[in-house]
Image: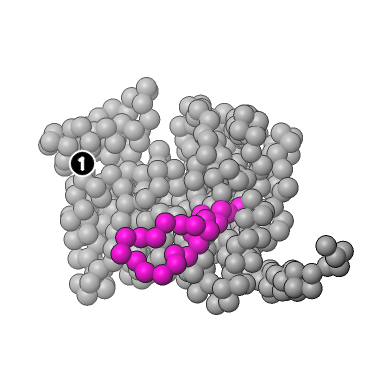
Amino acid sequence: MSGKADPRAAGEGTTSRTRLDRGRGALGPALELVHTGRAPTRAVLTAELGVTRATAGAVAAELEALGLIRVDARPGAAAGSQGRPSHRLSVAEDGPVALAAQIHADGFRAALVGLGGRIVATAPGCEVVDADPAKVLGSVVEAGAELLSRTGRRCVGAGLAVPSAVAEPEGLALNPLHLAWPAGAPVREIFARQVRAAGIEGPAFAANDVNLAALAEHRHGAGRGARDLLCVATGHRGVGGALVLDGRLHTGSSGLALEVGHLAVNPEGRPCHCGSRGCLDVETDPLAFLTAAGREPGPDVSLLQRSYDLIRDHYADPAVRTATETLIDRLGLGLAGLVNILNPDRIVLGGLHRALLDADPERLRAVVAGRSLWGQSGGVPILPCGLDHNSLVGAAELAWQPVLDDPLGVPA
């Protein structure tokens, strides 16, 4: 055999490198398309990116080499289909993860979340939240570090969801009303410090829990495909809202947009923490529901879980049914006002609000349609959240975003 290099092989290598060089700018958009499930095949990826098949192939191969996606070059053809099936694309199940943490009034939890919004591992939640945010965040990061150690996964960064408006750019929790934390606690700085102390790689982020729930639902859940998505939810205490506009989370000039919990829906209602009365925050949360149903909050079960149990197991009880209808009417009034102002193309409800929707969807939709300016012309779809732990998934999205922006920066 001759020792000379095959010029055809050299040419093919040069061509492949050229295609990849042309496609490097498409690595991030391509990864996001696979991450959100919008490019299940290489053919769809080619069309979405507006590149040649060869360039799309080079981009997919590079993302696979980075350990981020998998390319199935021999997918089975669907029954009755003709022609060669396109390569199937999926996120790498054994790829890197983000550490996600969530704090709420009744405890905290930690999880590892991979691409595609898939929760890989979770740590047992804690039911006590210390008045010192540093202690709480230290504990949740410690739980996350243990998960990383046990699974041996690469970590791209960490994200934190908190039940408070988070001011930008400082990352201050301005109103953690249902926690004993001081107003203005620098949660992002504390969280980042704890992450570094635990030896966890990657940047650390923090944001409002409902904002993150909306982000997760828009990318992976019931809000996927919506252009302008309104998300309203009540967790253990209080009510939050978030808005995705033209595909991007809208947080306002300093991260404080859409404090929907302080829309008044019952002028003669309960005093609210904001100084007003009858706000969504105190009229449609689990405590309001239990009070309307004549039930005492028990110490052994969270307010949210007790509310779920009543609606699921005791809906035939007249007091429970009446309480459900009362909260549906109050929630519908608030949603109608938001529809008039924001004109979303979809509404997604989470927490107790999802349970209220499931209990009597027609009543809620009728209230919103009857009270909103555009309701009679077709109405806005109102859907339950599609993800069980959307704030955790959303927290992971914060950590995944730098990788989506630049996949070449993923930790080795």
Q: Is residue 248 visible?
A: no
Residue 70 is one of the magenta-drawn residues: yes
SS majority, magenta: loop
- Can you say whether 160 is above or below 376 in the image? above
In the shown orientation, is residue 231 left or right of residue 54?
A: left
Residue 208 locus on image (x, y percent) = 52, 50
Image position of 349 with respect to 101: above or below = below
Q: Residue at x 34, y 33 (%)?
A: 305
Q: Position of residue 106 (x, y in %)?
A: 45, 32
Instruction: Report the side of 263 relative to 32 (left or right).
Output: left
- Residue in the picture at 30% in, 64% down: 80
- Viewport quadrant of the N terminus: bottom right
* Magenta range: 68-90
x and y percentages locating residue 369 in the rendered image: 22, 65
Within-10-Å neighbours for mark 1: few <14, some 14–19, many 20+ = many
Q: Please identify the quarter of the rendering in which residue 69 is found.
A: bottom right
Residue at the disc numbered 1: 323
Quarter of the image for residue 23 reads bottom right
Which of these two is toward me, 42 or 167? 42
Of 205 and 255, the residue lying toward us: 205
Q: Amino acid at mark 1?
A: Ala
Name the residue at 74% across, 36% down.
199
Q: Secondary structure at mark 1?
A: helix
